[in-house]
Amino acid sequence: MSAEPAPAPRVPLKRLIVPIAAMTFVVAAANVLVQHPVQHYGLDDKLTWGAFAYPFAFLVTDLTNRRFGPAGARLAVYAGFALAVAMSVALATPRVALASGTAFLFGQLLDVAVFARLRQLAWWRAPLAASMLGSAIDTALFFSLAFAGAPELSAPVALLPSLEVPLWVSLGVYDFIVKLIFAGLLLAPYGALMGVVRPFERAAPAR
């Protein structure tokens, strides 16, 4: 009978203070900025400033996953979720705070799972795939929970020349496009920080 692999050592919460603080700041900032459309170049019905802030949460999660493994990354996500929701209640409406927390939790946990599956492949594959898939679920959940049915965000706008959708759907689609772009752009700082993280990497199994 083969022996079962030893469980990965539990990561002390105090070692995750930096990623938790970074996640909390990013999510709280995104919750404020998502309430402000980009009023330049005709983007006011297509994009909010929150789209430019939130992708950094995936960068933090992926670096945490690389350094501490999926168990440590999930712990950071749970702690960041609790703190971010608490801050968001004070900085945004209760509906936006609840939607943000739900989307953050599901999106980041999917990111952690995908990254753990792909971590042994080429260095850029795990963060790129994890961020793209996590962004998809995050965007779908956040915009539907936060804004669906809201009168001020339900006016029809042209998503394509022959397709009109509610304003919140248009904002969600363009938000996702920006997140996809950032998933590629943030590979640069991720790759640069790999030199710092790699010597301490915890080669933890996906558990």
Image (cartoon, rainbow, N blue to C red):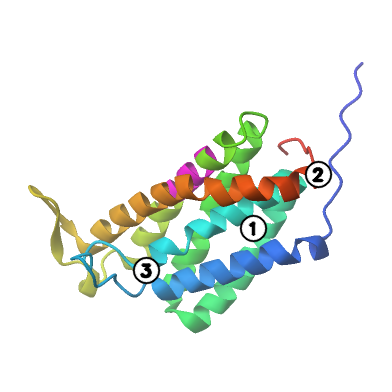
Q: Quadrant of residue 144?
A: bottom left
- In the image, is residue 174 above or below residue 17? above
Tell which tag, 3 or 2, sits nearer the viewer: 2
Whole-percent x and y of residue 127?
57, 42
- The answer to whether the residues at label 3 and label 2 have Cβ atoms under 8 Å apart is no
Q: Secondary structure at mark 2?
A: helix
Kindly tell me whether residue 105 is visible in this rendering: no
How far is the residue under mark 3 from the one under mark 2?
A: 36 Å
Whole-percent x and y of residue 35?
35, 74
Outermost residue, bottom side: 90
User: What residue span does the magenta drawing correspond to?
Assistant: 129-137
- The answer to whether the residues at label 1 and label 2 have Cβ atoms under 8 Å apart is no
10 Å crowding of disc 1: few (<14), some (14-19), many (20+): many
Q: Residue at x 24, y 57 (%)?
A: 170
Tell which tag, 1 or 2, sits nearer the viewer: 2
What residue sits right under mark 2 in the picture? 199
Chain-order first, disc 1 or disc 3:
3
Q: Residue 153 shows which numbered tag? A: none
What residue sits right under mark 3 in the picture? 49
Q: Residue 77 shows which numbered tag? A: 1
Whole-percent x and y of residue 158?
13, 56
10 Å crowding of disc 3: few (<14), some (14-19), many (20+): some
